Image (cartoon, rainbow, N blue to C red):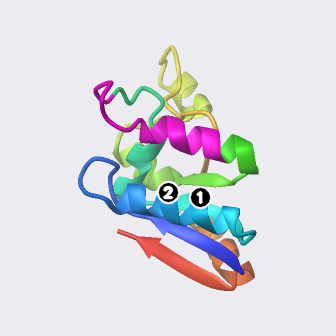
Amino acid sequence: MNFAIQITCSPYAGNGGLTAFRFIETALQMNHQVNRVFFYKEGVYHAFKYNTPPDDELQLTAQWSALAERHDLDLVVCISAAQRRGLLCEDEAKRQGKLDDDVAAGFRIGGLGQLLEATLTADRFVEFS
């Protein structure tokens, strides 16, 4: 089975992000495919590279980065939702005179067209909110 995933919940406002992470991890272990994970609305908070939750809590952003590297996952963050929430990609950070961008390793900025493409090529679309 080939999945397209959308995450619209913050990593800290509930269990939706962690549930999505575990769903994807399990699907990949069962030899299913995940063609893209799209982070939209509050879901873009998963991609902030400077997320620093307390040491005794799950480091979900780091977990996403590691999962993406292990499985060559395509983690796409909606550009409009990101800009509204202050997450700047490298180009936008330079344009605004910032010293650094905010996007964690393994994530990239994209648009709703990439969500549409993912849903058209997947067998199932699953949203975690």
User: Count of labels shown?
Assistant: 2
Residue 98 versus residue 78 in the image, above or below: above
Residue at the image point whose x is 35% and y is 26% from the top: 52
In the shown orientation, is residue 16 left or right of residue 27?
left
Residue 59 part of the magenta-drawn span: yes
Q: Quadrant of the N terminus?
A: bottom right
Q: Is residue 113 left or right of residue 51?
A: right
**Which quadrant of the view contains residue 119?**
bottom right
Q: Please check the rendered image and state whether residue 31 is part of the magenta-colored stretch, yes or no.
A: no
Mark 2: secondary structure? helix
**Which amino acid, by three-letter code, is at mark 1?**
Glu
Q: Residue furthest left?
A: 13
Which residue corresponds to the image point at 46% horizontal and 54% vertical from the top-left? 80
Q: Is residue 120 left or right of residue 110?
A: right
Can you identify the residue that label 2 sits on? Answer: 21
Q: Which amino acid lies under the numbered mark 2 shown in the image of this protein? A: Phe
Q: Position of residue 129 (x, y in %)?
A: 35, 68
Separation of residues labelled 1 and 2 (CA atoms): 6 Å
In terms of depth relative to the viewer, which is nearer, 1 or 43?
1
Residue 35 can be seen in this image = no
Rendering coords of residue 24 (x, y %): 58, 63
Mark 1 = which residue?
25
Q: Residue at x 39, y 63 (%)?
A: 8
Decide if residue 101 is in sight here.
yes
- Per the rendered image, the range of residues in magenta is 53-67
Name the side, left or right, on which 49 lies relative to 56. Answer: right
Tag 1 near tag 2, CB within 8 Å: yes
Q: Is 17 in front, or is 87?
A: 17
- Which secondary structure, mark 1? helix
Picture coordinates of residue 11, whole percent (x, y): 34, 49
* Quadrant in the picture for residue 53: top left
Furthest toward the front, the residue is: 30
